Image (cartoon, rainbow, N blue to C red):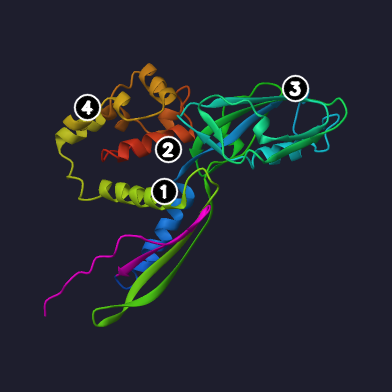
């Protein structure tokens, strides 16, 4: 009996309305609907980059538990409203936005003065209401990242007095759900159809979110195809100090598409190639100025694209 492998269909658009999209993938082998659906859902929620407020400085406000004269909202409420603003950051360098307003009236996201690298997708977002001769002077730092990052991780270095550090939710995704149903393929009725619903915050389209998540999965799986060759004396020597491979030694740190800040930190530490990176552990790299958890994740992803990893702890 000849065995034929049936490949799934490309994603099909069921509906796209505003920030929400529904897509289907047909002809999945029995059981693959949940395998693929759960994997894509986790990638969509955790691995799509976005921008978020990470630090705020308000003139005359020492901490987040203070109040502002003439403002109906407390500082804590203003910070929560700021976190509801959806930013698009063009580039990887942090950017600063500012706001200066006085007198009575509503303050919204459209009142911010933005550099050319920053866009606000929901300018109508309420920030606060001012009354009388109230004055609000505010600066916020916008950074790019993945998933959710606690402020303790973002501010491994001490922040300036009067600067309020925030937890950052970088993900541009509001909601992801999937369901699986059986369908007929040939004589069989137990193949799977995967239906996935994606809702974003407007900084990325649902279709783009699905496409990028599929690309990320393929990219990660390609990195683990095949097996590592057994260690030889020469490979052991490579681990101790020489370049692990000719290919890796030819890849410069500047060619890994890291952010300029991370690239500069590595080069200043004398790490010029991917081969040099593979001889370092994550904890060793964290000792360098400018290298934290987010930078380690960025380096690991860049190395994985070339089939390389950091040295195990």
Count of marks, rendered view? 4
Mark drawn on residue 27 = none
Q: Nearer the viewer, mark 1 or mark 3?
A: 1
Q: Position of residue 94 (x, y in %)?
A: 52, 27
Q: Indicate left or right for 164 with 25 as reference.
A: right
In space, the residues marked 1 and 4 are separated at their CA atoms by 35 Å
The magenta span reads: 1-28
Q: Is residue 27 magenta?
A: yes
Callout 1: 10 Å neighbours few (<14), some, many (20+)? few
In space, the residues marked 1 and 3 are separated at their CA atoms by 39 Å
In space, the residues marked 4 and 3 are separated at their CA atoms by 50 Å
- Residue 85 placement: quadrant: top right
Residues marked 2 and 1 touching at CB (< 8 Å): no
- Residue 298 placement: quadrant: top left
**Residue designated by label 3:** 59
Q: In the depicted view, which residue is nearer to us: 312 or 31? A: 31
Q: Nearer the viewer, mark 2 or mark 1?
A: 1
Q: Earlier in the sequence, mark 4 or mark 2?
A: 4
Q: Earlier in the sequence, mark 2 or mark 1?
A: 1
Q: In the depicted view, which residue is nearer to us: 301 or 185? A: 185
């Amino acid at each position: 009996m000849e065995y034929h492998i049936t490949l799934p269909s490309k994603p099909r658009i069921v509906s796209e309305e505003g920030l929400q999209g529904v897509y289907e993938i047909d002809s999945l082998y029995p059981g693959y609907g949940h395998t693929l659906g759960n994997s894509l859902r986790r990638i969509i929620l955790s691995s799509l980059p976005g921008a978020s407020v990470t630090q705020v400085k308000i003139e005359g406000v020492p901490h987040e538990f203070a109040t502002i004269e003439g403002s109906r909202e407390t500082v804590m409420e203003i910070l929560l409203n700021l976190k509801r603003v959806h930013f698009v950051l063009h580039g990887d360098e942090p950017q600063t936005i500012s706001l200066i307003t006085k007198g009575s009236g509503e303050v919204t996201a459209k009142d911010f003065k933005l550099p050319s690298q920053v866009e606000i997708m929901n300018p109508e977002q309420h920030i606060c209401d001012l009354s009388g001769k109230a004055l609000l002077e505010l600066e916020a730092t916008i950074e790019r990242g993945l998933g959710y990052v606690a402020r303790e991780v973002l501010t491994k270095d001490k922040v300036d007095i009067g600067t309020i550090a925030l937890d950052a939710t970088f993900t541009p995704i509001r909601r992801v759900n999937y369901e699986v149903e059986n369908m007929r393929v040939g004589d069989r009725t137990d193949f799977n159809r995967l239906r996935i619903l994606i809702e974003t915050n407007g900084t990325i389209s649902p279709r783009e979110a699905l496409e990028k998540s599929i690309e990320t999965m393929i990219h990660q799986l390609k990195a683990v195809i095949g097996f590592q060759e057994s260690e030889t004396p020469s490979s052991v020597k490579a681990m101790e100090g020489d370049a692990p491979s000719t290919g890796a030694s030819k890849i410069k740190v500047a060619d890994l598409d890291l952010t300029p800040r991370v690239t500069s930190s590595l080069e200043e530490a004398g790490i010029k190639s991917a081969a040099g990176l593979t001889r370092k552990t994550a904890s060793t790299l964290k000792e360098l100025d400018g290298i934290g958890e987010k930078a380690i994740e960025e380096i690991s992803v860049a190395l994985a694209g070339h089939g390389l990893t950091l040295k195990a702890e």
